[in-house]
Image (cartoon, grey):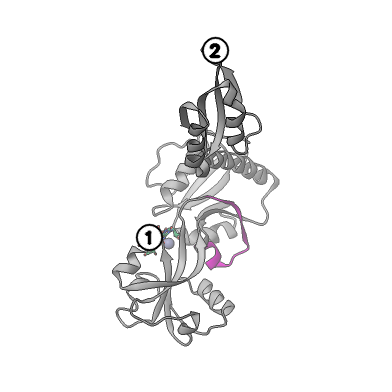
Amino acid sequence: MENLKIAIQKSGRLSDESLGLLKACGIRFSNGAGKLRTEALNFPLEVYFLRDDDIPQYVADGVADLGMVGENVLYEKQLPLTVAARLGFGRCRLALAVPKNEAYRSIESLRGKRIATSYPGLLQKFLQSQQVEAEIHEISGSVEIAPGIGLADAICDLVSTGSTLLTNGLREVETVLQSEAVLARPQQLSVEKEALLQRLLFRIEAVQQASRNKYILLNAPNDRLSTIIALLPGIKSPTVLPLALPGWSSLHSVIEENQFWEVIEQLKLAGAEGILVVPIEKMIA
Ligand code: PRT
Ligand code: ZN
């Protein structure tokens, strides 16, 4: 059987979570630290470790079938690839920033200015969409120091916490792109590889669902059960088991992480006791 070849970042911000996601999907690897490629032990899959910037081209050329890469890198390359899944890590934004004491009213303030970036393609598109012309100065690293050394009036770079901008006396003024890691694929894959991709996507979805949800167990007097069941969102029919104590039941259900605290407070008010919340390892809807 042919292996599905997947390219991930060799060493950088996406590496641990890329490999971690495959492992959470139940795919095991022999220990191959520092290797260029490794084969999975229990799934027809091969992993290539590459620089993130090279991943889209490898997938477009068919050397790899899939790639885990930031949207910022994927869209900058403008290759005929699509997103098979959003992966939920490596979140950041591509943003425009100016020296903090510079007057900035709107994007118009950048007209005719010199902007340093490693993302000339994305910046050009953004400026065009805003109908602003500016001079794009492409540099490959340390973009944030460009204004300070007189190389540019503004920068367009990735931001996550904003502390790099702060230390360099810069102020974020516009968002060009919101980005996260994605699984990139070509438009066409062989029938066999497409089937393997679908198996992988099924597992990724189960891992992501599980991390968005918690398993909840609680005890409640029988006369409060209908109130409590109504508080549990999205669940048609929780499991209700009788307790040894007459008049009481144990209720089991699934709850979304983002509604968690609000619901717990209401459950307590409605008379729930002994509430246990436990992580779910895999979840298949
Ligand atoms: O060697 P290789 O080419 O593979 O790695 P790399 O150095 O090009 O990339 P790497 O590992 O730095 O980033 C890989 C991907 O992580 C990026 O393409 C983004 O999709 C994603 N990502 C998420 C980030 C950040 N957050 C991030 N904060 N990539 C870079 N940064 C940098 C940013 O460029 C700036 O220098 O961190 C600094 C800003 O961070 P804050 O927290 O100070 O705002
Ligand atoms: Zn890179």
Q: Look at the picture and state if 215 lies above or below 34.
A: above
Marks 2,1: beta carbons within 8 A: no
Can you give x and y, in whole percent of width and height, for residue 132 in the image? Answer: 53, 83
Among numbered discs 2 and 1, the one appearing first in the sequence: 1
Q: Is residue 157 above or below residue 49?
A: below
Any mark on residue 161, and which?
1
> What kind of residue is marked 1?
Thr
Give the image quadrant in which the ligand numbered 1 is located: bottom left
Q: Residue drawn at (49%, 43%), measured in percent from left and top? A: 21
Q: Would you say 162 lies left or right of 265 here?
A: left
Mark 2 residue type: Pro
Q: Is residue 281 visible?
A: no
Which numbered disc covers residue 27? none
In front of the other: 146 or 64: 146
Judge whether residue 55 is colored magenta. Answer: no
Is 213 located above or below residue 58 in the figure? above
Label 2 Cα crowd, 10 Å radius (few <14 / some 14-19 / many 20+): few
Q: Is residue 83 magenta?
A: yes
Q: Residue at x 47, y 26 (%)?
A: 273
- The image's mark for residue 246 is 2
Which x, y percent locates residue 81? 61, 60
- Quarter of the picture containing the N terminus is top right
Measured Cα–Cα span from mark 2 to mark 1 = 54 Å
- Disc 1 under 8 Å from ligand 1? The reply is yes
Find residue 144 and report its horizontal and vertical position in percent: 35, 72
- The stretch in magenta equals 73-87
